[in-house]
Each structure stands twice: as C-alpha cells, then as structure tokens.
Image: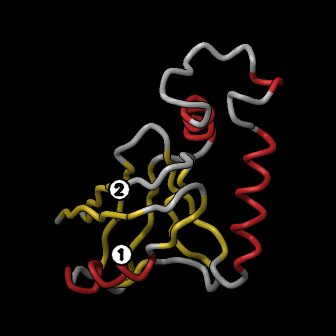
C-alpha cells in the first residue's frame, strides 16, 4: 500500500504531519508492517522529534541555521552553488546531514512511536514550498 503526503511550507522550520500518517495507516487495516517515508526533495528532510514542547522545534531550527548559515554569510563564501539564492546550497547541506527517509514499525495497526514523538518535514528553504513525501506500508 502506498500514498503521497503533500506538506505546504511557509519557510524554514519543522512541519508536523503525524496525524495525517496515522489516519492513512489506520485506513490500511494492516496489523504488522514496516512504514517507510521518503521526502522527494533535495532541500528538505524528515525527522522524528518531540511534539509536546514547540520550543524543541524552534531550537532545532535555530541550531541548524547557526550550523549552516545562508550563503550570504561571510563564513560561507567558499560556496559555489549560489544561483538559486543564498538559502539553496545551505538547504542541500542540511538535507545531507539529516535523514530524508524514515522507517517506522507498525504493530497492531498503529505506528510504534514514543509518547512525545512526532513526524516532521524539516523545510530548509526560506520561500514557501509544496513538499511531497512518499509513503510505503508493507
């Protein structure tokens, strides 16, 4: 069973889509399976992160912005790929550092996530984007 999730982003940050995935898994009526999620873009990532305190997502975004600043930052002057804007190459670097796919077990028809875990698309570009995540349940 497979589907695609579309996540509309408004710029950098983490966008939770756990509930959409849960609803799809519930409709599949599969007792035991492996769920694979894959983001189909080279400037965004997928992460499982805490979904209880929004400060976690804010702090993660701030950390990765400090770790990999925009190409316009003097510390990034060595970058050559700048044609698509100062956020593009840093977005590729972040996507290379973070996962672009996730594997989640499904047992008794439910995803086996921890109490405070949620599934997020991590947008690395500054403009809004429409991101797609492919999902396979088998």
Relative to 108, is 79 on the left or the right? right
Looking at the rendered image, the disc whose residue lies closer to the viewer, 2 or 1, is 2
Residue topped by disc 2? 130
Residue 23 x/y as whole percent: 31, 84
**Where on the picture, by quarter, is residue 79?**
top right
Q: The N terminus lies in which quarter of the figure?
A: bottom left
State the SS at label 1: helix
Quadrant into which the C terminus falls:
bottom left
Secondary structure found at label 2: strand
**Disc on res. 70:** none
**N-term mark: 2 or 1:** 1
Task: Count residues near mark 1 (Cα–Cα under 10 Å), then give few for <14, some for 14-19, many for 20+.
Answer: some
Residue 53 or 111: which is nearer the viewer? 53
Q: For residue 58, what is the image quadrant?
A: bottom right
Question: What percent of the width, then of the height, locates residue 71?
Answer: 68, 28
Q: Which residue is outermost to the left?
A: 1
Instruction: Give residue 137's position: percent from left, percent from top.
Output: 26, 65
Depth order, front residue of 124/116: 124
Query: What is the image's colouring?
Result: secondary structure
Q: Residue at 62% across / 86% down in the picture?
A: 115
Q: Determine contact: label 2, label 1, CB under 8 Å.
A: no
User: What is the number of callouts on the image?
Assistant: 2
The correct choice, above or below, for 40 with respect to 60 in the image is above
Instruction: State how far apart marks 2 and 1 are (Cα).
Output: 17 Å
On screen, residue 116 versus residue 85, left or right, reads right
Residue 5, given in percent of the width and then of the height, sits at 30, 65
Name the residue that disc number 1 marks. Answer: 21
Say if 47 sits above or below 127 in the image.
below
């Amino acid at each position: 069973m497979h589907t695609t999730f579309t996540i509309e982003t408004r710029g950098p940050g983490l966008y939770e889509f756990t509930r959409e995935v849960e609803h799809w898994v519930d409709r599949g009526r599969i007792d035991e399976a492996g769920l694979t999620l894959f983001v189909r873009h080279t400037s965004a990532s997928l992460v499982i992160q805490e979904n209880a305190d929004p400060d976690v997502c804010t702090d993660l975004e701030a950390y990765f912005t400090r770790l990999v600043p925009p190409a316009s930052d003097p510390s990034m002057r060595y970058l050559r790929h700048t044609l698509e804007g100062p956020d593009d190459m840093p977005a590729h670097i972040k996507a290379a550092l973070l996962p672009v796919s996730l594997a989640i077990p499904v047992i008794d028809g439910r995803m086996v996530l921890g109490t405070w875990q949620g599934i997020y698309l991590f947008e690395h570009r500054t403009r809004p984007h429409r991101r797609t995540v492919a999902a396979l349940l088998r």
